[in-house]
């Protein structure tokens, strides 16, 4: 719904009888929900945007635009780097990394695997999803691995032999499927 129509819907709520207010408010809410649903779907896949992905290729070029003819902005040389897909066009995905760098990658370079990367300092892993639980490992900045599952604000991670729980805000990466 165009913004002008949404404003009219909201104004209409202000000038109707109390009996019709609840119905008008629900109609306006549903209209906003529909608009949001339409604007956060990827045009090529129909999947929600933004969404998480990770690199499945050992070498991946981040390009300025959606095609091989665009200049390379950055080259990644590490499998498993988590990225955020923020747009898509045909076979290309616009992604953002942990430093906020944005560009385009071909979809064949990306995986649906839930991955994480430690940033902004180290991370403490715990045996249970609780602040006072036993420490199982310390992960340094730059370490990456699998994101196994999340419960509320806690997520279970695995990097090599290290496994444990940490807060959702302690790493860069997406929720597991």
Image: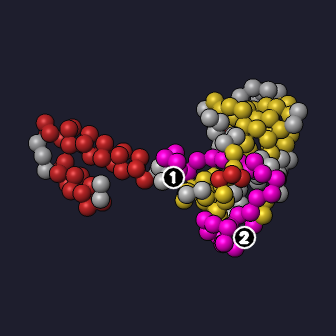
Frontmost of labels 1 and 2 is 1
Does the magenta portion include 57?
yes
First to last magenta residue range: 45-74
94 relative position to 159: left or right: left
Q: Secondary structure at mark 1?
A: loop
At which x and y percent is residue 153?
Answer: 63, 36
Helix, strand or loop at mark 2:
strand
Residues 107 and 98: in front is: 107
Q: Is residue 85 above or below residue 4?
A: above
Tell me where residue 154 appears, x and y as whole percent.
Answer: 67, 34
Residue 73 appears in the rendering: yes
What is the CA distance from the residue labelled 1 to the residue labelled 2? 23 Å
Taking depth in this image into account, of 138 and 92 the one nearest to the observer is 92
Q: Please state which of residues 82 and 132 is positioned toward the viewer in this rendering.
A: 82
Task: Say which residue label 2 marks.
Answer: 72
Residue nearer the viewer, 111 or 148 = 111
In the rendered view, does 105 fall on the left or right side of 51? right
Residue drawn at (61%, 32%), measured in percent from left and top? Answer: 152
Residue depicted at 12% across the width and 46% down the height: 16
Residue 173 visible in this rendered orientation of the protein: no
Task: Assign the C terminus to one quadrant of the image.
Answer: top right
Q: Are marks 1 and 2 in contact (CB under 8 Å)?
A: no
- Quarter of the figure with residue 68: bottom right
Q: Which mark is residue 18?
A: none
What is the total number of numbered labels drawn onto the structure image?
A: 2
Q: Which residue is mark 1?
A: 44
Q: Residue at x 72, y 37 (%)?
A: 147
Residue drawn 69% across and 73% down? 71
Q: Main secondary structure of the magenta part?
A: loop
């Amino acid at each position: 719904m165009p913004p002008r129509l949404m404003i009219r819907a909201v104004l209409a709520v202000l000038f109707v009888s109390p009996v019709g207010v609840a119905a008008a408010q629900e109609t306006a809410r549903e209209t906003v929900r529909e608009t949001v649903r339409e604007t956060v779907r990827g045009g090529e896949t129909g999947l929600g945007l933004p969404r998480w992905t990770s690199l499945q290729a050992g070498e991946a070029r981040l390009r300025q635009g959606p095609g091989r003819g665009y200049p390379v902005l950055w080259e990644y040389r590490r499998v498993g780097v988590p990225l955020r897909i923020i747009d898509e066009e045909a076979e290309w995905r616009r992604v953002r990394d942990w430093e906020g760098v944005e560009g385009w990658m071909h979809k064949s370079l990306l995986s649906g695997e839930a991955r994480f990367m430690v940033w902004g300092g180290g991370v403490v892993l715990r045996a249970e999803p609780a602040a006072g639980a036993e420490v199982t490992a310390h992960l340094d900045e730059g370490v990456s691995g699998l994101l196994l599952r999340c419960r509320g604000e806690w997520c279970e991670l695995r990097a090599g032999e290290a496994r444990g729980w940490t807060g959702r805000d302690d790493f860069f990466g997406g929720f597991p499927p």
